[in-house]
C-alpha cells in the first residue's frame, strides 16, 4: 500500500492499552508505548502529512496518545484512520470503515 501511495517512509508505534489477566480476559489498562519510531526521523514541514492508522478506536485513548507523541516529535499535518470505531470513543478518526455497538467485542483475523 505504501508503494502504491508513493509513501517512502513507514514506521510502526507499539502502544498497549489493554492488560490481560490470568483468566485470559483483556480489560482496559494503563497506556504503554513499547515501540517508538527511530530518533533520526526528521520533523515534517507544515504541509506534509502524517497518517496514523489503528484497527479500532474503542475508547480513543491510543489515538490521542499517539497523536500527542507524534505532534511533539514530528509535527506536520496529522490524519487518522481506523477500520472500526465505537460510539463512545474520545477520538473519531478522520476516516473509518464502520461503527459498531459499544459493547461489541471485535476479534480481527490477525488476532486469531
Image (tube, rainbow, N blue to C red):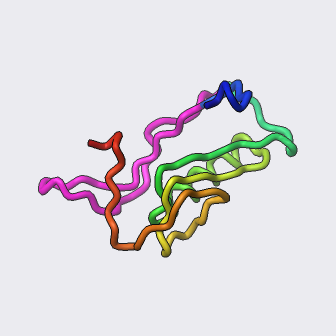
**Quarter of the figure that contains the C terminus:** top left
Measured as percent of width and height from the top left, residue 47 is found at 87, 44
Residue at the image point whose x is 82% and y is 40% from the top: 48
Q: Is residue 76 left or right of residue 106?
A: right
At x 29%, y 62%, the residue is 27
Residue 5: name its quadrant. Answer: top right
Q: Magenta span has 24?
A: yes
Query: Hey, which quadrant is residue 17 in on the image?
Result: bottom left
Start and end of the magenta stretch?
Answer: 11-39
**Residue 83 location (% of width, % of height):** 51, 53
Query: Foreground residue, 89 or 66?
Result: 89
Q: Is residue 90 left or right of residue 27?
A: right
Residue 56, given in percent of the width and then of the height, sits at 47, 56
Position of residue 65 relative to residue 10, above or below, is below
Q: Nearer the viewer, residue 90 or 103?
A: 103
The residue located at (12%, 57%) in the rendering is 23
Amino acid at each position: 500500500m505504501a508503494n502504491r501511495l508513493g509513501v517512502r517512509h513507514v514506521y510502526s508505534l507499539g502502544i498497549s492499552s489493554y492488560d490481560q489477566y490470568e483468566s485470559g480476559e483483556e480489560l482496559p489498562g494503563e497506556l504503554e508505548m513499547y515501540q517508538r519510531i527511530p530518533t533520526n526521523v526528521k520533523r515534517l514541514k507544515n504541509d506534509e502529512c502524517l497518517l496514523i492508522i489503528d484497527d479500532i478506536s474503542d475508547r480513543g485513548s491510543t489515538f490521542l496518545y499517539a497523536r500527542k507523541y507524534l505532534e511533539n516529535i514530528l509535527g506536520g499535518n496529522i490524519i487518522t484512520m481506523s477500520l472500526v470505531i465505537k460510539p463512545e470513543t474520545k477520538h473519531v478518526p478522520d476516516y473509518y470503515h464502520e461503527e459498531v455497538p459499544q459493547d461489541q467485542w471485535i476479534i480481527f483475523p490477525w488476532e486469531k
